[in-house]
Image (tube, rainbow, N blue to C red):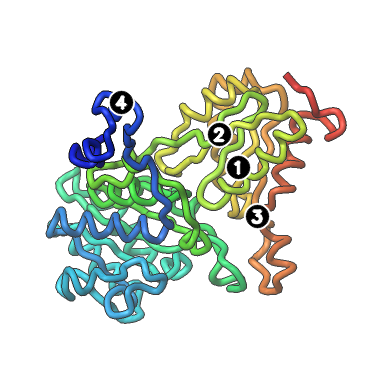
Amino acid sequence: MANISRKFLLQANIPLALARRCFAVSAARSQKITVRSALTRALNEELARDEKVILLGEEVANYDGAYKVSQGLLEKYTEKRIIDTPITEMGFAGIAVGAAMHGLRPICEFMTFNFSMQAIDQVINSAAKTYYMSAGSVKVPIVFRGPNGAAAGVAAQHSQCFAAWYAHCPGLKVISPYSAEDCKGLLKSAIRDDDPVIFLENELMYNVTFDTPDECLKEDYLIPIGKGKIEREGNHITLVAHSKAVSLCLDAAEELKEIGIEAEVINLRTIRPMDSEMIIKSVKKTNHLVTVEQGWPQFGVGAEICAKISESEAFDYLDAPVVRVTGADVPMPYAKSLEEAALPRVMNVVNSVKKTLNIEQSSAAGRN
């Protein structure tokens, strides 16, 4: 009733008591925003909140970022805080790490995480290890962010997933968001964190639109690092994924629903520290597990999940071996048909579920 004036009601001869019952107006519960917009909002809010936050990287200022994530930030915060750098990852990553050691909170953007290999010494030996080597006296509050994993038609040198690479290293926190809500809440948490954070975005997700609750768009909304999210509840099998692979699991779950299989889909959100408790609890309920990722199989995120389950009480609840769905164990091909074959698809997830449950589609309907 807040949006309906008393004058209008009197002119329309509508009793106020009736109006209170019939004209209740609810605030919008969600908005449709893209992943790119969510990231931009998070950057803008944290830059406004803390003058120690800076953004630096190739084309982040005058070009608004290679993927337009930093659009409008140069005009608002000037070149003192939105800094274009030369094409030298080792150089500007080192500057960012040094700035973090001296009290700033840098956000270091890699145009793609494939280029972070040029700066690996700064990320691992300087950022990740300094807090330990200084006995806790030197903090390195820095965020390394940019697109990670396979894009489209960019071949072997621009298509790697670095989730497992960086999650292997103590001293780093590794985030791999899926939705707009993930990106906004987790990027803000990463910027405020006192440890170095690897923030792995996905190029193909930037333009994807998500229904995002109004609560998640508030400036004080944060998602805790190290906590996953159950995107879909189910009781027959657990599907665990991160980043774009979450959408594969959700699509597979809808297809499986048609044959009577209810899959629980877990969005990891954070790779290190991993929400093992959520996975274990789900496996104890469903008794089956399939992990899904776009990265390579050997020593991957799925392999670590398998190890955690085998070393926990959840192992005794498994009715079948854990199955991993991954990218092919080859460098990414350039040809479109081969690229598609090298990445996991919905049918791979569906077939893995059927294999785990030891069923055929014809006999799947009517499962309890």
Residue 283 quadrant: top right
- Where disc 2 sits, the SS reads strand
Q: Residue furthest right?
A: 362
Q: Which amino acid type corresponds to the residue marked 4 in the rendered image?
A: Leu
Task: State if disc 3 and disc 2 touch (CB < 8 Å).
Answer: no
Classify 10 Å Cα crowding around label 4: few (below 14), some (14-19), many (20 and above): few
* Residue 351 rendering spot, x and y as whole percentages: 77, 42
Please name the residue shown 70% across and 44% down the image: 349
Q: Which amino acid type corresponds to the residue marked 1 in the rendered image?
A: Leu
- Where disc 3 sits, the SS reads loop
Please name the residue shown 40% across and 63% down the image: 146
Give the residue pinned by disc 2.
Answer: 232
Residue 330 vs 130, above or below: the answer is below
Sequence-first disc among 2 and 4:
4
Give the residue pinned by disc 1.
Answer: 250
- Where disc 4 sits, the SS reads helix
Dot in front, 3 or 4: 4
Give the residue pinned by disc 3.
Answer: 327
Task: State if disc 3 and disc 1 touch (CB < 8 Å).
Answer: no
